[in-house]
């Protein structure tokens, strides 16, 4: 900065979270806190069977229960053309079942009553006659000839295949494999898990019978998209629909899709003329809403004898449940899975993906993952470790020989991604140094001699976050850009309205910091508003770590627009030419006469009290930002574990996580995001599992079967950082909200496998319970 004045810096500062004042005092405002006069309550009857034809539904006893106002069935919805709804990937999903139930937990009928207990009690009085059909539990089963057709509601559908999609260059990859000295194969399954946010899904639908205005308070990560979907599904005019996402108690991807509960509550409010509240219970959340993963992956790496990677082949089979409902760019049938070449310079790759219906819950985007990058990252990081063992090269060294080098950026991957920036070796070196890698390896060798098992696992991942650009990315045709609208009031305080929607990520603080950085208005003077479709500009919502890359960029750009106008205003106030002014972070100074200045607040005041004739009054603007590319955050994680040869239990000794998300706006919030993500990554590696028995009963329908870690199980994390700015983002930031969940499962699994690798163990399937380890120990002759 120049003489006279130094403005405060607002990037890289751990400003305390503005939102925490209300959260810590129990003054948050969640959907279930909303109570409207005359409000009714809704409860959902779910199918006990995974696959069955419905022969009849008798609701008369339920309707007769005092306090019950209505019972809604699929048949009633069908009369309004609402029995089915579109999914975010262009398939259809039943709102309430009409012909068949296709998963355990499917929504069959809804009771609307004066209080939630009566609504719940009445469910038991509904008589449904089911004719059981054979359930299809795995995608392998589902694709076998003669398998029962799950989606026989579709006239043209005679099998269970949803998509077949390929990426990369098959011939070039075949050539690479012909030239290879070594081919290393690996296959694994990334099991189904669930985001399980603390707050389940829910809504309060309020249709005003006089004005026709539909107000829906809703647990939504993407309120504008949901409004448009509602308008298309119901035929209601879009300006008459207002979606309000108040405080959200965690989303993790779970609150991206539209669920039947929202649609039925809205339809019921419309038909009855009173507000209807639906709050999902925990079991409903776990068994019916957006699951994660469920990818079977196998592939091979073609290598030269010196360890140079020449080619990669991957086949993936996805279990989508009974509807293809991934929230993902419409052109990419398997999401961003084809970024499976990871951080490595692999000249040729070919990826083949297939998706299949099964009698399970649909979903398949959720859980801290930018459109399937988590599965891709897991696969390549596990494969690389396997290749290191087969070649007899240290896993860190094999990575080092193959990293995309800093001078190769922007780097075009074999499957067509243009990586913006990276420095992978630097991040890995930092992680190895923090861990004390060489010492730990020596300790591991000593421990083995003493009969103890120590394992070291690495993951050096690359992510791809921040969709658009809109030319390549859309959801249901809605292009993926994002927006920010900024208004500075006469006294220099501001309101920022954004198209994305926080669920705990701290946007009220970090987005205010972006404005502060560009305009010098301190963050406490910037109110950040989101989640209300009537009062924010259109945006695609918060998922896939896209808020900072898109709406964050829009916020910087709209602030700069206002700064340009403020320059005109300051020039007018100071009676100089705009070119004679210099911006010093929070004010304009006259070049050569720095004591003559106009602060941003004074310029704002002038915008309403003393603007030049011919200029529009006011200081406000809106920017719709279409990112030129995605951002590619990366990191290097290193985990050390100890395995008990007697019980198969494994304990985490160290977790080192070096993340690079470009310029950090708020380091405290970034570290919070990383620690949360590491916890979830550990959870997937160690305990989280949704599985099914042979009848399609969901095992994992409550928190005593679906295990999530408490503070007691969660390891301690040691964090480090490198900073490689995104060259195309206005403040050089990349997304970070999912990095640790994407990168860390492979590091944990690699560590446990490493403890047993000298005895030939190559694979342990997640979640790695002591039972699986014990079996592997026994087979490898290591059990004690
Ligand atoms: N940030 C920063 N500097 C950067 C990058 C990010 O200070 N270089 C800040 C951001 O400004 C924001 C936070 O870190 O406050 C996360 O930013 P970003 O990476 O842009 O991700 P999003 O805000 O889009 O959040 C989405 C991401 C996803 S997809 C899931 S899933 C997830 C996650 O965030 N769900 C969460 N973190 C979560 N954290 C909480 N508490 N609750 C959830 O539901
Ligand atoms: Cu896919 S979990 Mo986040 O993208 O909401």
Image (cartoon, rainbow, N blue to C red):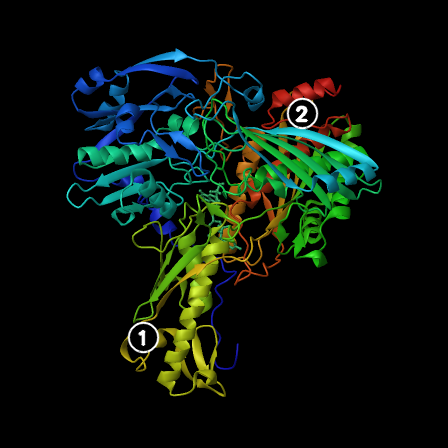
Estimate how packed mark 2 is, as few (under 14), some (14 to 19) or many (20 or more) residues with alpha carbons within 10 Å.
Answer: some
In the image, residue 93 sits, relative to residue 468, either above or below, namely: above
- Beta carbon of the mark 2 residue lies under 8 A of ligand 1: no
**Residue 88 shows in this picture:** yes
Q: Helix, strand or loop at disc 2?
A: loop
Q: Looking at the picture, how far across and down is residue 154, in whole percent?
A: 43, 26
Can you tell which of label 1 and label 2 is closer to the viewer?
1
Name the image quarter holding residue 114.
Answer: top left
Query: Residue 220 vs residue 211: left or right?
Result: right
- Residue that mark 2 sits on: 644
Residue at 17% across / 46% down in the picture? 211
**Residue 646 shows in this picture:** no
Which one is nearer the viewer's eye here, 129 or 649? 129
Q: Looking at the picture, how far across and down is residue 532, in whole percent?
A: 32, 50
Does the residue at mark 1 contact the one at mark 2 (Cβ under 8 Å)?
A: no
* Residue furthest front as drawn: 156
Q: Looking at the picture, how far across and down is residue 737, in whole percent?
A: 51, 47
- Residue that mark 1 sits on: 616
The quarter of the rendered structure image containing the C terminus is: top right
Residue at 74% across / 42% down in the picture? 172
Name the image quarter holding residue 84.
Answer: top left
């Amino acid at each position: 900065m120049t003489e006279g004045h130094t403005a405060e810096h607002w990037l890289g500062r751990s400003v305390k979270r503005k939102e925490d004042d209300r959260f810590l005092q129990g003054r948050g405002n969640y959907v279930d806190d909303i109570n409207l006069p005359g409000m009714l309550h809704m409860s959902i009857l779910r199918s006990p069977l995974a696959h069955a034809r419905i022969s009849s539904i008798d609701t008369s006893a339920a309707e007769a229960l005092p306090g019950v106002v209505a019972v809604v069935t699929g048949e009633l919805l069908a009369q309004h053309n609402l029995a089915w709804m579109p999914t975010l990937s262009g398939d259809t999903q039943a709102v309430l079942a009409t012909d068949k139930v296709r998963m355990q937990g499917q929504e069959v009928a809804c009771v609307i009553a004066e209080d939630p207990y009566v609504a719940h009690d009445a469910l038991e009085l509904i008589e449904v006659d089911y004719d059981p059909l054979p359930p299809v539990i795995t995608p392998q089963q589902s694709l076998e000839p003669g398998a029962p057709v799950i989606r026989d509601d579709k006239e043209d559908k005679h099998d269970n295949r949803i998509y077949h999609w390929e990426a990369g260059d098959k011939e070039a990859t075949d050539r690479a494999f012909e030239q290879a000295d070594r081919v290393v194969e690996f296959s694994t399954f990334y099991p189904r898990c669930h985001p399980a946010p603390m707050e389940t899904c829910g809504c309060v639908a309020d249709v005003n019978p006089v004005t026709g205005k539909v107000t829906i308070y809703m647990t939504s990560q993407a309120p504008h998209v949901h409004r448009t979907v509602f308008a298309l599904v119901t035929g209601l005019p879009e300006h008459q629909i207002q979606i309000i996402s108040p405080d959200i108690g965690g989303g993790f991807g779970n609150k991206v899709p539209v669920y039947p509960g929202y649609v039925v509550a809205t339809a019921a409010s419309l038909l009855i003329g009173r507000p209807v509240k639906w709050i999902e219970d925990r079991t409903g959340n776990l068994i019916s809403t957006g699951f994660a993963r469920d990818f079977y992956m196998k592939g091979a790496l073609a290598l030269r004898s010196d360890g140079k990677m020449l080619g990669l082949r991957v086949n993936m089979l996805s279990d989508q449940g009974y509807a293809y409902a991934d929230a993902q760019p419409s052109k990419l049938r398997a999401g961003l899975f084809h970024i499976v070449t990871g951080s490595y310079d692999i000249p040729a790759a070919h990826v083949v993906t297939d998706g299949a219906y099964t009698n399970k819950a649909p979903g398949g985007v959720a859980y801290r993952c930018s459109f399937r990058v988590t599965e891709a990252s897991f696969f390549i990081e596990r494969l690389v470790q396997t290749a290191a063992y087969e070649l007899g090269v240290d896993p860190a060294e094999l990575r080092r020989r193959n990293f995309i080098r800093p001078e190769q950026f922007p780097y075009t991957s074999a499957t067509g991604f243009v990586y913006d920036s990276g420095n992978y070796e630097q991040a890995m070196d930092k992680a190895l140094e923090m861990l004390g890698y060489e010492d730990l390896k020596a300790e591991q060798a000593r421990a083995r001699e003493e009969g103890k098992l120590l394992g070291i696992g690495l993951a050096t991942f690359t992510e791809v976050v921040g969709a658009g650009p809109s030319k390549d990315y859309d959801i249901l045709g809605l292009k993926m850009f994002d927006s920010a609208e900024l208004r500075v009031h006469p006294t220099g305080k501001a309101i920022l309205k954004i198209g994305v929607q926080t669920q705990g990520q701290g946007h009220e603080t970090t987005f205010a910091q972006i404005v502060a950085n560009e305009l010098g208005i301190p963050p406490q003077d910037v109110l950040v508003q989101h989640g209300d479709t009537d009062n924010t500009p259109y945006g695609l919502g918060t998922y896939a770590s896209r808020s900072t890359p898109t709406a964050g960029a829009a916020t910087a750009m709209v602030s700069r627009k206002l700064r340009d106008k403020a320059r005109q205003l300051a020039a007018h106030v100071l009676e100089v030419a705009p070119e004679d002014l210099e911006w010093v972070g929070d004010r304009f100074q006259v070049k050569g006469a720095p004591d003559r200045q106009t602060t941003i607040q004074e310029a704002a005041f002038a915008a309403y009290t003393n603007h030049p004739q011919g200029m529009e009054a006011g200081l406000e603007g809106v920017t719709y930002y279409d990112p030129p590319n995605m951002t590619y955050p990366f990191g290097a994680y290193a985990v050390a574990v100890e395995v008990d040869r007697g019980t198969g239990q494994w304990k985490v000794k160290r977790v080192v996580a070096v993340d690079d998300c470009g310029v950090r706006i708020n380091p405290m919030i970034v570290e919070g995001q990383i620690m949360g993500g590491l916890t979830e990554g550990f959870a997937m590696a160690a305990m989280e599992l949704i599985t099914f028995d042979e009848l399609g009963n969901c095992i994992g329908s409550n928190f005593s079967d679906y295990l999530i870690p408490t503070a007691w199980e969660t390891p301690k994390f040691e964090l480090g950082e490198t900073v490689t700015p995104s060259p195309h983002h206005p403040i050089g930031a990349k997304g970070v909200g999912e990095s640790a969940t994407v990168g860390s499962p492979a590091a944990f699994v690699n560590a446990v496998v490493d403890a047993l690798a000298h005895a030939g163990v190559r694979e342990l399937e997640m979640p790695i319970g002591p039972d699986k380890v014990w079996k592997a120990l026994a087979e490898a002759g290591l059990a004690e």
